Image (spheres, grey):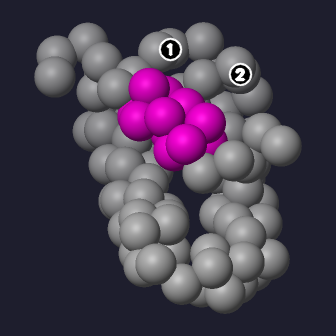
Amino acid sequence: LGKYDGSTPEEQYFVDAVADNYIDWRAAWVAAKFSGDPEKLKAYEATALPEFVKLFERFLAAHNGPFFLGNTFTYVDVAVYQIVHDSGALR
């Protein structure tokens, strides 16, 4: 991923940790969204969604910038934007 993965081992570890949590968020959303059970989706929106939003707010705050690594754009910024958009976290 080159320059979109952090420039130090510490940054790369952090980006990888954010990506791992993104995968968890996406899996939870997909399971709820495509379950065919409206109650599962409501439960996700009431419990899991707010918890994931809080977690990713903490990740963003860790480097004081608009991106997960401060002023450095990484692939995880795109991935997380996608799940924030798709999951309705911006509503």
User: Left of 21 or right of it: where is 91?
Assistant: right
Q: Secondary structure at mark 2?
A: loop
Task: Answer with the quarter of the image where residue 26 lies.
Answer: bottom left
Q: Earlier in the sequence, mark 1 or mark 2?
A: 2
Q: Residue at x 41, y 69 (%)?
A: 34
Q: Residue at x 77, y 66 (%)?
A: 50
Pointers 1 and 2 in contact (CB under 8 A)? yes
- The crowding category of the residue bearing disc 2, from other C-alpha atoms within 10 Å (few below 14, some 14 to 19, many at least 20), is few
Q: Amino acid at mark 1?
A: Thr
Q: Residue at x 61, y 36 (%)?
A: 85
Q: Position of residue 64 (x, y in %)?
A: 75, 28
Q: Main secondary structure of the magenta part?
A: helix
User: Left of 83 or right of it: where is 3?
Assistant: left
**Res. 65 mark:** 2
User: Left of 49 or right of it: where is 35?
Assistant: left
- The crowding category of the residue bearing disc 1, from other C-alpha atoms within 10 Å (few below 14, some 14 to 19, many at least 20), is some
Q: Residue at x 30, y 18 (%)?
A: 4
Residue 84 lies in the magenta-colored region = yes
Who is closer to the viewer here, 41 or 48?
41
Who is closer to the viewer here, 82 or 14?
82
Residue 48 lies in the magenta-colored region = no
Task: Answer with the quarter of the image where residue 17 lies.
Answer: bottom left
Q: Position of residue 69 (x, y in %)?
A: 54, 27
Who is closer to the viewer here, 37 or 9?
37
Q: Is residue 59 visible?
A: no
Task: Answer with the quarter of the image where residue 39 lies.
Answer: bottom right
- Is 49 placed above or below 79 here? below
Q: Amino acid at mark 2?
A: Gly
**Res. 11 mark:** none
Which range is magenta? 76-86
**Res. 72 mark:** 1
